Image: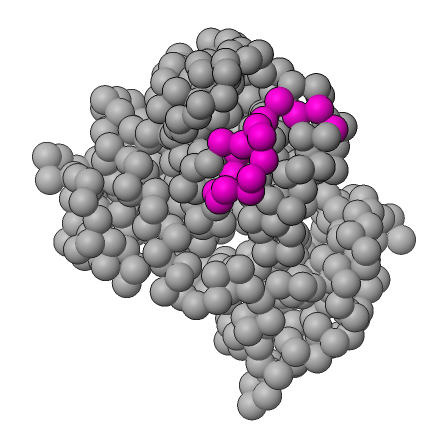
């Protein structure tokens, strides 16, 4: 691709037009002669410091935010903003060939995006999905390195999806992805907000910064769908400029759930959109899944599909991996695997399970290393308030001492009467939980969900699938 074609609408330059062989911001990989290098300033490394070296390695030009007195430089106000626009152009603007649906919030993103994809597929659409668990192009599945991919990977995925005949793409849009402008150049037909609770403060510093990062989705959405049961959702409804639709399980909204019945196998309720009432059955337990299903119905209606058709499609949906997922045991107790890794998520899943539990609810959980330490004690308090017994263990300790993390967690149990045990090794902890399970117990393995790995010191990633560990424990 010619340089002038690539940077059209993004940057101006007096450099002669030339052939560009690729776009990169990575100094670690092999450089192809003729690439355009984009200087990105991160928390620990500033790409500008490598600009001259990248030219020496064969890059055709460098894109910078300041005059570096280099012969082949192009200066723009914001390289983070420019990078995804260049990637979009490089891949032939695939985002313009797709109807994009974005979901943001602390909890519920994976469930909502997965269910939207399944419903649209039932309607005969070919759908791409980008999210925490995996990326999907129709039935083709590939692993996901992060919730919202870096720009080159993101637009490369869009290109594959468009070429494969996808008409819709539903994606989780993370606060960090928004703040780092990874989705610049995208225009979402629908942007959905689920909720905002404490998480990622190691990245954003404050809840206000976290809120403002999420808010950026609605600057690039044609229409918003907002959960007004959440205080931050009510604030978005006052502050965002795009048209919006609201949903609620508690009160007055455009889309509401009424006469709610909760059970271990799912939820039933009456859906109302002001035009009529419809009976809904959704095979995922908990009040929060009433909320998640309302978001899906609202999205489908905005996309032009009838409520009746969407509700009928729910009949074929049997859960989402790692979200209140029942792990088969063949015994007289139940094991549930859930991704809950914030205080609010623990409250949601444990309270939902407790509603229908015949025996004790036992929660096994830990907190990630090198992540927001301030949520560790609140997570313990949330678990203690909503479970009958706790097993405190590890969850991706990374470069922190697992025992130090557990000590931080235990601060939240001061003054609580809920009994607990600490077992540093998560495999050993799961074996203990299974060995000591009693009739009608429900053991909730919280924090890992869909993940099939543990991250240890030095970034070492080992295989660790809780479903396999439960099977081992049962065999033993």
* Magenta stretch encompasses residue 59: yes
Q: Which residue shows up at 72% across the image and 30% down it?
A: 56
Residue 70 placed where, x, y %?
Answer: 58, 35
Question: Is residue 45 covered in magenta?
Answer: no
225 horizontally vs 435: left or right? left
Which residue is at the front of the view, 41 or 306? 41
Magenta stretch: give its range: 57-74
Q: Which residue is at the front of the view, 2 or 177?
A: 2
Q: Is residue 343 visible?
A: yes
Outermost residue toward the left? 275
| Quarter of the figure with residue 26 | top right
Mark count? 0
Residue situated furthest right in the rendering: 476
Q: Nearer the viewer, residue 349 or 303?
A: 303
Q: How is the image coloured?
A: one colour
Examine the rendering and report whether any part of residue 138 can be seen: no
Q: Residue at the spot x=41%, y=28% of the render?
A: 11
Residue at position x 62%, y 22% in the image: 60
Q: Nearer the viewer, residue 85 or 314?
A: 85
Magenta span main SS:
loop
Residue 359, image quadrant:
bottom right
Q: Name the residue furthest bottom.
A: 415
* Left or right: where 94 falls relative to 366: left
Residue 416, compared with residue 301, is above or below; it is: below
The image shows residue 402 at horizontal and vertical percentages of 77, 69
Q: Position of residue 173 (x, y in %)?
A: 44, 41
Q: Residue at x 74, y 76 (%)?
A: 404
Q: Position of residue 375 (x, y in %)?
A: 54, 70
């Amino acid at each position: 691709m010619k340089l002038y074609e690539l940077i059209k609408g993004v940057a101006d330059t007096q450099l002669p037009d030339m052939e560009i062989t690729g776009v990169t911001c990575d100094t670690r990989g092999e450089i192809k002669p003729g690439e355009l290098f984009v200087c990105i300033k991160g928390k620990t490394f500033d790409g500008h410091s490598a600009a001259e070296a990248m030219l020496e390695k064969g890059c055709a030009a460098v894109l910078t935010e300041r005059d570096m007195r280099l012969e082949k430089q192009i200066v723009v106000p914001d390289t983070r903003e420019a990078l995804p626009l260049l990637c979009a152009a490089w891949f032939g603007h695939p985002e313009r060939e797709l109807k994009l649906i974005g979901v943001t919030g602390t909890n519920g993103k994976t469930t909502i995006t997965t269910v939207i994809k399944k419903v649209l597929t039932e309607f005969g659409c070919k759908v791409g999905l980008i999210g925490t668990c995996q990326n999907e192009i129709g039935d083709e599945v590939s692993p996901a390195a992060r919730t919202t991919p870096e720009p080159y990977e993101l637009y490369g995925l869009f290109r594959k999806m468009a070429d494969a005949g996808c008409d819709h793409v539903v994606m989780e849009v993370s606060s960090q992805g928004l703040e780092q402008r990874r989705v610049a150049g995208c225009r979402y037909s629908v942007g959905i907000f689920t909720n905002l609770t404490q998480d990622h403060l190691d990245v954003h510093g404050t809840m206000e910064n976290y809120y403002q990062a999420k808010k950026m989705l609605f600057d690039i959405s044609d229409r918003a769908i907002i959960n007004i049961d959440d205080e931050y959702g009510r604030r978005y409804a006052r502050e965002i400029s795009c048209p919006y639709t609201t949903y609620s399980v508690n009160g007055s909204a455009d889309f509401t759930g009424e006469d709610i019945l909760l059970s271990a196998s799912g939820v039933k309720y009456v859906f109302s959109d002001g035009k009529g009432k419809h009976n809904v059955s959704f095979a995922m337990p908990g009040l929060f899944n009433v909320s998640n299903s309302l978001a899906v119905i609202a999205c489908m209606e905005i996309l032009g599909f009838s409520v009746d058709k969407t509700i009928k499609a729910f009949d074929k949906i049997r859960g989402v991996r790692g979200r209140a997922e029942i792990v088969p045991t063949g015994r007289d107790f139940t094991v549930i695997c859930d991704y809950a890794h914030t205080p609010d998520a623990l409250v949601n899943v444990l309270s939902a399970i407790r509603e229908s539990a015949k025996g004790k609810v036992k929660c096994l959980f830990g907190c990630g290393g090198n992540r927001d330490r301030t949520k560790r004690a609140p997570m313990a308090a949330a678990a203690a308030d909503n479970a009958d017994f706790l097993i405190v263990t590890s969850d991706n300790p990374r470069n922190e001492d697992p025992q130090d993390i557990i000590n931080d967690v235990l601060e939240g149990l001061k003054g609580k009467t809920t009994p607990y045990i600490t077992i540093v090794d998560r495999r050993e902890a799961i074996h203990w939980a299974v060995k000591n399970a009693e009739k009608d117990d429900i053991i909730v393995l919280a924090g890992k969900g869909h993940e099939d790995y543990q991250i240890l010191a030095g970034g070492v990633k080992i295989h660790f699938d809780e479903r396999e560990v439960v099977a081992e424990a049962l065999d033993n």
